[in-house]
Image: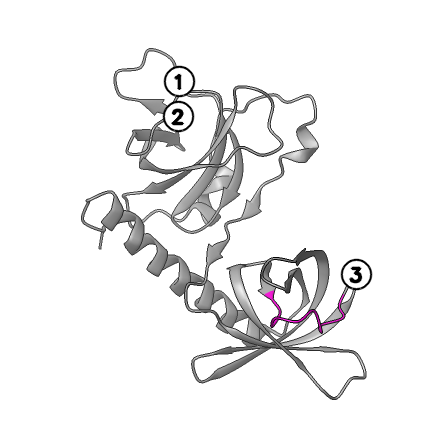
Amino acid sequence: MSVAGWEKSVDYALYEVSHHNIGIISSDPLEVGTMVTVEYRDNQRIPLIVHQIVPKKNLPPGYKRFRLITTDPEVNFERILPESSQRKVSFSNRHQYHVRFARFNTEIPTRVEARTFGSEEPYHLKTINVSKTGFLLASPPGFRVPFHESTLLELTLFVEDQAIRCLGKVIRCEVDFEKKLKRYGITICDIHAEDRELYFSFIEDTEHRKNRQVFRALNIPMPI
């Protein structure tokens, strides 16, 4: 990864990926709006822009997380990353920095019905953010939802006029005493092919809406 005018390349570790966006960890002083390029396969160059500096969390001193977006609409990072030759940073506890699918906030929450196995009555929750492998849900106020870590759930997401069904597992549970609700991190365990296609389309639409906001904030026309 290189920056115009810099003598050295940017050393980084990849931690997040989606169709048009990547997240990296680096000690280099990148700023929002910085234009960078990545080379891959036959010296093809991918143009990107730093659009967010992510709050530091569980990183060695001097490192930050950054999110970047490509200005090339033909790029699909989910497809090309296995072929790319990213430069890597070495961490002593490297296992903490695995690559995950990017999460996108759902500014208009998606309604979700969740049932434990054998239960007829669903609990009604709403999405906070979504990714291709799962989502973060918020319960209604009142602490009445009884799920805990490792709870297996039958889930139905209502996306416009479609119901997307899958099986999920609670991998994280947070209690927000100020807002009097719970938040549940869900990983998708099983989903039928047709529902997976609908769900991935939903994620791509969510990313596209987010990208429009990013380019608007950067005051750059969104690539078509």
Label 1, label 2: how many angstroms apart (C-alpha)? 6 Å
What residue did someone put label 2 on? Answer: 1
Say which label, 2 or 3, has the lower sequence index: 2
Q: Are marks 1 and 2 in contact (CB under 8 Å)?
A: yes
Image quadrant where one finds the C terminus: bottom left
Mark 1 is on which residue type? Answer: Ser
Q: Specify whether 39 is left or right of 182.
A: left
Q: How is the image coloured?
A: one colour
Query: Which residue is at 29% across, 29% downward?
Result: 34
Relative image position of residue 217 (x, y in whole percent): 26, 46
Relative image position of residue 223 (x, y in whole percent): 23, 50
What residue did someone put label 3 on? Answer: 150
Residues 77 and 163: in front is 163
What residue did someone put label 1 on? Answer: 9
Say which label, 3 or 1, has the lower sequence index: 1
Q: Specify whether 100 is left or right of 65.
A: right
SS under mark 3: loop
Q: What residue occupies the far top of the structure in this picture? A: 7
SS under mark 2: loop
Image quadrant where one finds the N terminus: top left
Relative image position of residue 15 (x, y in whole percent): 55, 38
Q: Which stretch is magenta?
A: 138-147
The relative height of residue 163 versus residue 223 in the rendered view (above or below) is: below
Please name the predominant secondary structure of the magenta segment in the image: loop
Crowding at mark 1 (Cα within 10 Å: few <14, some 14-19, many 20+): some
